[in-house]
Image (spheres, rainbow, N blue to C red):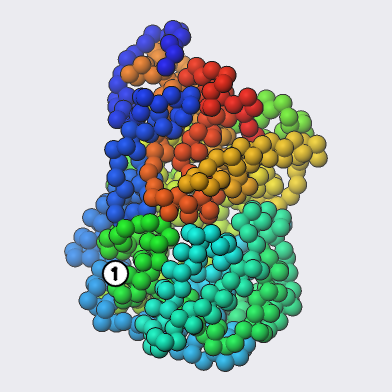
Amino acid sequence: MPALEAPTKPVTTKSLAAIGLDPDSLDRTADPCDDFYQFACGGYIAKTEIPADKPITMRSFVAISDRNLEYEKSILETASTKPGDDAILKQLGTFYGSCMNEAAIEKAGFAPIKPLLAQIDKVKDAKSLSAAVTQLHINGVSAVFDMGPTQDAADATREIADVEQGGLGLRDRDYYLKDDEQTKKIRSAYHDFIAATLVDVGHKPEDAAKQADDVIGLETELAKVSKDKVARRDPKGMYNRLDRGGVAKAMPHFDWEGFWKGVGLGTVKDVTVGSPDFLTGVDALIEKTPMNVWRDYLTTVTLRSSSSFLSKKLEDQAFTLRATITGQQENTPRWKRCSGATDAALGDLLGQAFVRDKFGGQSKQAAEEQVHAIVTAMTANLAALPWMDAETKVKAAAKLNAMSYQIGYPKKWRTYAFKLDAKNWGGNALASNRAENARQLAKIGKPVDKDDWEMSAPTVNAYYEPSLNGMVFPAGILQPPFYSVDSSIPVNLGGMGVVVGHELTHGFDDQGAQYDLDGNLKDWWKPETSKLFKQRTQCVIDQYSKYQVSGQNLNGANTVGENIADIGGVKLALAGYRALRSSAADTVVADGFTEDQQFFLGYGQAWCAKARPDYEKLMATLDPHSPAHWRVNGALSATPDFAKAFRCKASAKMRPANACVVW
């Protein structure tokens, strides 16, 4: 690297390890100005083997999740064997223990879902089809369409019903509509899965292949009337207030009166849909598709949704399909699957123990300090933006000032009242599904609860919700390498600080910018400023659309929101770290790296990853985030301070002539 300028403060020398970076993850033969991701993570990639039970491994998300799971295992195994008189441990232990009781699961077979299969067997016309779909929805199985609560985009204080496209067994409509070799391989594996599972529940082997063809044919028709990923990124296009009568008019062959009554929403009036054309398309399919095909489809949906809590044979069949899609070599160990299922079902019970043991000391205070530093940086950034007019700046600042954040764990822990049976894993899983579905539907028609979290405290993730204008940072993500009390400020801000800045920037990305300070879908921009914003957004789309993964270009329009947030997150966290270090008496040089360089290394190493080729292709197709390589290089090449920190020449790849910066 080029020689560095002499520091202006007394120098304290430390090692990279001492400040929270991994020297062995570096590839010092790489030029940071050519490929910073390789420079920061090349050593990690070279020395790391992807575990057989994973499609990807990461220095951050995957490693933290594994550590959190190991902790959860210790809690749950104790709870399942020696819960004592602790009511919380008894619930956790019964649920987890029933999941681990493979002998009882095999003995039960398909008994837990026999009532659902019996309902499906009754399907002979549109009315009985509607009744079967209703029963599946009550049990948390989203057949044909998805339905749940959503904040009213015109009045964010209220929850209304939301009917969305759904019903597909593969994760994206493109898997039904494209004909490249990888897509055809996935469809073939899905066909084999359907046929095998239909045989499992008594269909004749000689009939199952044709039935699988028919099911995929029906799902292909559903895919044709579904919006694609990019269209679904448009909040205004996704908000269509049809209300109860309009939904019935769009899909008249479905018994909506029976559905609303069956799911406990007999008096619902306010309904929005993501795509009216989807409802119209489904209605035509109800009329023209033979009822035997609908029965086979609903059976497939039920088996696919239930595969995690029925026989080992069904689980293995589901894994074979997943392995074809992701390249994963072995199924995840049962204890991990059961820990994850327990977290999904009883997250706030597990979260209480996790927070007690893993989120003590200075963690919450330090995270709050980072949030304040980054909000301050965004405030200054807004004031200095050259392309935004004064009036829009005032409204943007008001939105930022109104933004809420929650750190670590919810203000109030949830309780779980559904009954559990130590010898009935399938029954427990269905009871959990029914309870959560009922909890969600009970929100409809009521005021929004801003303290209701979308994920549990141990979850390794964070999110910004535009209709709440709020951010949530669970305790699960506030772990090394994102954050550690032992790491330096530059490294912590390069890790967790960028996550905070990323989520904050989502409030002003291509979607978030369409919501006002109260979370309403409302235009608050001056027309000329809005035009400039869209031009800058298009620049980001074009930048990332040029990047390739496994021989295919990224979909810059699908990833634009996350890319804007990455670029903004780096910029804000950099300013935040500098503010926090501005009054320091010294400057730290770690193995020759300045504090700015440490910040960028902290960001880069938080995303060190190694993925299987099939999984890379899957994520490049589906994920609204760019792959790790381009999350790092894309955001840093749009950060002029990076090129300055590493003395990159004007011709370097990491120093483009025109940086695509929105915020």
Q: Quadrant of the N terminus?
A: top left
Q: Quadrant of residue 639?
A: top right
State whether residue 573 appears in this view.
yes
Q: Where residue 467 sits: x, y (%)?
A: 63, 52
Name above or below for residue 57 compared with residue 210.
above
Rendered position, 468 above or below 266? above
- Identify residue for label 1: 99
The residue positioned 53% from the left and 27% from the top of the image is: 654
Determine crowd level at label 1: few under 14, some 14-19, many 20+ residues with C-alpha closer than 10 A. Answer: many
Residue 446 in sight from this viewpoint: no
**Tag count:** 1
Work out which residue is located at the far right of the displayed protein and give it: 527
Along the viewing direction, whichever of 558 and 15 lies nearer the viewer: 558
Q: Nearer the viewer, residue 114 or 419?
A: 114
* Residue 245 drawn at (x, y percent): 74, 76
Callout 1, which amino acid?
Cys
Indicate the quadrant containing the C terminus: top left, top right, bottom left or bottom right: top right
Q: Is residue 131 above or below residue 265?
A: below
396 or 331, nearer to the observer: 331
* Residue at figure coordinates x 37%, y 53% from the top left: 55
Q: Residue at x 47, y 46 (%)?
A: 550
Give percent across and percent down for residue 337: 32, 62
- Residue 90 against residue 540 in the figure, above or below: below
